[in-house]
Amino acid sequence: MKTAQYPNLLKAALALCLAAPLSAVQANDAHHPATAATPASNSGAGVVSDGGNASNADAALSDGEIRKVDKEQGKLTIRHGPLANLDMPPMTMVFRVKDPALLDQVAAGEKIRFRAEKIEGQYVVTIIRKLTNGGT
């Protein structure tokens, strides 16, 4: 290989490196459709006390613990397990709530199962189920 060909080889390698992440994003978007396309009727906000019993409907919910309720800002701080629908690992973070009435029905320290969605670029809690028997 001639020395003059190396710059072209480097350009080609750089182009491949830059194109790969874009195709990965497109592949991720293909199997994680935007929540904006989900009809609002599919995700009503609400709090349900389930006595700690899991059901098939809970499969779409994630485990969490309320760390803080901020009624003035309309936010909840939740320590949560993996959020499969958002491809998010466990962490503690602040969420907005879809319905401000949710803030009156939970308190710091409560174990919950919940659904969060990305709506207009923000993470929003749409459903909360309180676990009253220390359920898993």
Image (tube, grey):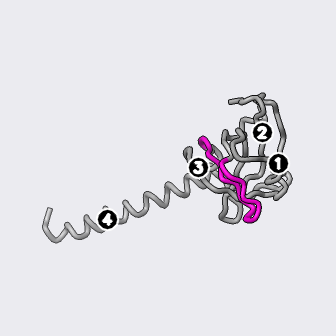
Residue 62: image x %, image y %?
67, 41
**Helix, strand, or loop for circle 4?**
helix
Q: Nearer the viewer, residue 16 or 106?
A: 106
Sequence-first tag of 1 and 4: 4
Sequence-first tag of 2 and 1: 1
Q: Which mark is residue 130?
A: 2
Separation of disc 2 and disc 3 at Cα? Answer: 18 Å
Q: Which residue is mark 3?
A: 92
Separation of disc 4 and disc 3 at Cα? Answer: 41 Å
Q: Which mark is residue 105?
A: 1
Look at the numbered discs 4 and 3 and tell me whether their residues touch, using CB distance below 8 Å. Answer: no
Q: Residue at x 70, y 38 (%)?
A: 111
**Helix, strand, or loop for circle 1?**
loop
Look at the numbered discs 2 and 1 and tell me whether their residues touch, using CB distance below 8 Å. Answer: yes
Q: Which residue is mark 4?
A: 12
Sequence-first tag of 1 and 3: 3
Q: Quadrant of residue 53?
A: top right
Q: Is residue 74 magenta?
A: yes
Residue 30: image x %, image y %?
61, 53
Look at the numbered discs 1 and 3 and tell me whether their residues touch, using CB distance below 8 Å. Answer: no
Sequence-first tag of 4 and 3: 4
Separation of disc 2 and disc 1 at Cα? Answer: 9 Å
